[in-house]
Image (spheres, helix red, strand yellow):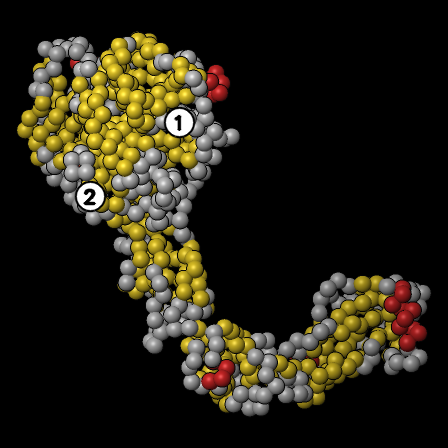
């Protein structure tokens, strides 16, 4: 506290000096004198007492020293600055003192005020009384007891306890039986009647007067046998993180409760009945997984219901502010193509060419309002639906040289546009499309087949909004829960079997002979039956906002969106043979209520278009590129074998013949196998432990010579195969 000089205080002091005891020597007056601090709790500092040191004369005086002496001097102390210094005439100095009784009974000491020019100090008697200590509770043992327990002995730890101390529950006027153990401990018997319900019982200790008083309440928790988990912080942890604590919030946690990680107890610290802290080991965090997390109360308590806790895949997420309408992956050029509308400003009406590793983007003009995209199987042609002029245009890659253009018809509702677009995997000149109007939230349209600009035929009796070529002779169409099989020949398409109500979702995907619905169904068109369903949490009536990308070669399907296995937006990986979730990639930083496209790229990436507000959004979509070798199994902790190449198909290449695919047969291949052609890495598809497919760009065979193909497996272990030569004629 600061030292204060006050004329008003001096006047008050002089007025009171005739009725209150004051001591004057020279022109200095000290008030109060004597000073009575009253009764204080043992070892507890009381409220400060205000003192005024007043100069009643007109000449400044110097207070040179202030000390405390006497038998109980140590029980009194200055609180803040003293009045040592100059006090001007007709001024006063205000200061404060406190009493901390260090003994019971009467306390006495003296305040000594030394003034320059006076031969002896002014003395002020200091008086007080040390009463009983103020009780303070620091801990209760046990801190919890089960609801419905019998009368329970409670150990109260703290300070200031007396043989006369008593404990009370819930501010009852009647104390509970209390036994004095020491000045730091009491025991008390809590009756069974106070343990009948759950919640917090207030425990307080009372010491009698003089001094003493009622301690602050300390809470004793009555918990049910079965604990409840509400939240866990953090909500997820990335695989590969070092040992870290997690905090579990909930209720009815008993002292001694343990956190179970897939049924195995973690080192657990009890905080209170609503919070536990558990230490998760580095080993438990080594691999992405979905954990069953629960809390177990000690006997006779039980276990909580389990909640899901995610150890998520490590991932690099690249978000590009590109308002794309569609995406396709070009494995030959190892880039992603995105169609951009005119609203994108100077780079509108273009095809963006995206390096998925760096995000570097180039732009090529496409025409008016490009939307749907389709890449030919040999990577030579990119087909682009142009809504602005009701056409489909073909570009020759990689230079984006304009090629053919197909004008679509006009219906009674206006010009038709490509609602879906697909290219034959074996004939780069043959493509199929569905027509629809260009209005927002367009409706499904008829199916048309073309070879170059020639219309082969139309199927006008069915509606489809999604097309997928299974092979050269079979195409599947989908719309609102109906899958249609279409036989494809050189004359166009012929509608075959249609299945309704088996596959649901907004879109379908196809891989290795099976059709995957956005609602989690896996359908085998060869049998007309479901082979299973993985739980994506989809609603009914095809309203699932989940997109699926299957990869049968690694026995995985990836569901993009919010699934039951993660509280936020992400990619959930499923085991296809068991239809169960494996782990999740956390993408909570992405805000998306509607998903347009979900594609794989390379060996260890997935990409999609995230649209914030569904159909006809106000906010522009974004392109999101996710790289996660762990999720796509291209890296792992098991030792990889050293690969070996036995054959290549084709075994030779003709120079200048353009892009081609090569089937690599051998042994020891893994999902993370890399293929190089004369040292340059190719895009590769893992097919099995004995087969890989590599995508060779035309630039790699521009001239004659011999290429060297090498397969390399990543660590741990792994290694490079013996090079296989490829003659280029």
- In the visual, does 231 lie left or right of 14? left
* Residue at (30, 9) in percent of width and height: 404
Residues 554 and 120: in front is 554
Q: In this figure, which residue is indicated by the disc labeled 1?
A: 443
Q: Position of residue 515 (x, y in %)?
A: 23, 35
Label 2 residue SS: strand
Residues 375 and 590: in front is 375
Residues 112 and 249: in front is 249
Question: Where 80 falls versus 309 (above or below)?
Answer: below
Question: Where 280 falls versus 134 (above or below)?
Answer: above
Task: State the mark number for residue 531.
Answer: 2
Q: Position of residue 692 (x, y in %)?
A: 14, 30
- In the visual, does 132 lie left or right of 390? right
* Residue at (28, 63) in percent of width and height: 263
Residues 637 and 602: in front is 602
Say whether residue 544 is visible: no
Q: Quadrant of residue 279?
A: bottom left
- Crowd tier of the residue under label 1, counting other residues whose Cα lies within 10 Å: few below 14, some 14–19, many 20 or above: some
* Residue at (26, 40) in percent of width and height: 502
Q: Nearer the viewer, mark 2 or mark 1?
A: 1
Label 1 residue SS: loop
Indicate which disc, 2 or 1, sits on the residue closer to the N terminus: 1
Q: Quadrant of residue 513?
A: top left
Say whether residue 382 is visible: yes
Q: Position of residue 144 (x, y in %)?
A: 44, 75
- In the visual, does 191 lie left or right of 328? right
Image quarter (top left, top right, bottom left or bottom right) of the N terminus: bottom right
- Crowd tier of the residue under label 2, counting other residues whose Cα lies within 10 Å: few below 14, some 14–19, many 20 or above: some
Image quarter (top left, top right, bottom left or bottom right) of the C terminus: top left
């Amino acid at each position: 506290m600061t030292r204060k000089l006050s004329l008003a205080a001096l006047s008050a002091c002089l007025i009171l000096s005739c009725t209150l005891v004051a001591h004057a020597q020279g022109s200095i007056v000290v008030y109060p004198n004597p000073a009575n601090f009253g009764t204080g709790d043992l070892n507890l500092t009381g409220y400060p007492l205000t003192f005024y040191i007043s100069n009643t004369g007109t000449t400044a005086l110097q207070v040179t020293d202030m000390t405390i002496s006497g038998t109980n001097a140590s029980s009194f102390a200055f609180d803040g600055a003293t009045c040592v210094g100059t006090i001007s005439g007709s001024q006063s100095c205000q200061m404060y003192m406190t009493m901390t009784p260090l003994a019971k009974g009467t306390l006495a000491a003296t305040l000594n005020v030394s003034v320059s020019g006076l031969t002896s100090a002014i003395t002020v008697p200091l008086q007080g009384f040390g009463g009983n200590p103020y009780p303070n509770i620091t801990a209760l043992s046990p801190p919890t007891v089960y609801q419905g327990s019998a009368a329970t002995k409670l150990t109260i730890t703290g300070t200031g306890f007396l043989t006369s101390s008593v404990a009370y529950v819930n501010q009852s006027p009647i104390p509970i039986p209390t036994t004095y153990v020491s000045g730091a401990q009491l025991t008390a018997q809590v009756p069974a009647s106070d343990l009948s319900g759950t919640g917090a019982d207030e425990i307080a200790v009372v010491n009698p007067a003089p001094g003493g008083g009622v301690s602050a309440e300390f809470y004793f928790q009555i918990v049910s046998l079965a604990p409840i988990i509400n939240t866990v912080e953090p909500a997820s942890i990335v695989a590969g993180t070092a040992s870290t604590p997690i905090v579990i919030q909930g209720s009815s946690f008993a002292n001694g409760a343990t956190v179970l990680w897939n049924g195995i107890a973690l080192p657990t610290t009890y905080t209170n009945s609503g919070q536990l802290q558990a230490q998760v080991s580095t080993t438990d965090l080594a691999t992405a997984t979905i954990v069953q997390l629960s809390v177990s109360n000690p006997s006779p308590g039980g276990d909580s219901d389990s909640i899901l806790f995610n150890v998520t895949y490590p991932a690099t997420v690249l978000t590009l502010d590109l308002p794309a309408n569609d995406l396709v992956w070009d494995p030959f050029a190892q880039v992603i193509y995105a169609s951009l509308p005119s609203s994108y400003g100077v780079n509108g009406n273009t095809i963006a060419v995206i390096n998925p590793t760096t995000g570097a983007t180039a732009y090529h003009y496409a025409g008016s309002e490009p939307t749907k995209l389709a890449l030919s199987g040999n990577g030579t042609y990119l087909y682009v639906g142009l809504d602005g002029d009701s056409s489909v245009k073909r570009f020759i890659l990689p230079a984006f040289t304009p090629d053919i253009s197909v004008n679509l018809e006009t219906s009674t509702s206006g010009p038709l546009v490509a609602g879906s677009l697909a290219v034959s995997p074996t004939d780069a000149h043959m493509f199929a499309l569905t027509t629809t109007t260009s209005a927002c939230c367009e409706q499904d349209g008829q199916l048309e087949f073309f070879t170059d600009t020639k219309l082969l035929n139309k199927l006008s009796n069915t509606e489809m909004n999604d097309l997928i070529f299974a092979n050269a002779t079979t195409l599947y169409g989908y719309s609102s829960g109906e899958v249609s099989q279409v036989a494809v020949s050189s004359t166009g398409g012929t509608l075959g079997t249609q299945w309704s109500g088996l596959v649901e979702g907004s879109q379908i995907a196809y891989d290795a002979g099976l059709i995957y619905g956005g609602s989690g169904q896996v359908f085998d068109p060869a049998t007309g039956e479901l082979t299973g369903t993985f739980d994506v949490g989809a609603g009914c009536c095809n309203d699932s906002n989940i997109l699926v990308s299957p990869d049968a070669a690694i026995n995985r399907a990836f569901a993009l969106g919010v699934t039951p296995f993660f509280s936020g937006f992400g990619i959930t990986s499923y085991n296809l043979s068991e239809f169960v979730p494996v782990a999740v990639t956390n993408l909570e930083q992405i805000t998306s209520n509607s998903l347009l496209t979900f594609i794989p790229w390379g060996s260890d990436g997935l990409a999609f278009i995230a649209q914030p507000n569904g159909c006809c959004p106000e906010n522009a979509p974004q392109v999101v590129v996710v790289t996660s070798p762990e999720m796509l199994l291209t890296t792992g902790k098991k030792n990889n074998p050293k690969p070996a190449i036995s054959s290549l198909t084709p075994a030779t290449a003709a120079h200048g013949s353009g892009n081609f695919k090569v089937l690599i047969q051998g042994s020891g291949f893994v999902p993370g196998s890399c293929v190089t052609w004369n040292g340059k890495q190719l895009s590769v598809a893992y097919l099995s432990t004995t087969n890989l497919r590599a995508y060779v760009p035309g630039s790699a065979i521009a001239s004659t010579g011999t290429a060297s193909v090498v397969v390399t497996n990543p660590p741990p272990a792994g290694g490079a195969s013996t090079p296989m030569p490829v003659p280029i004629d």
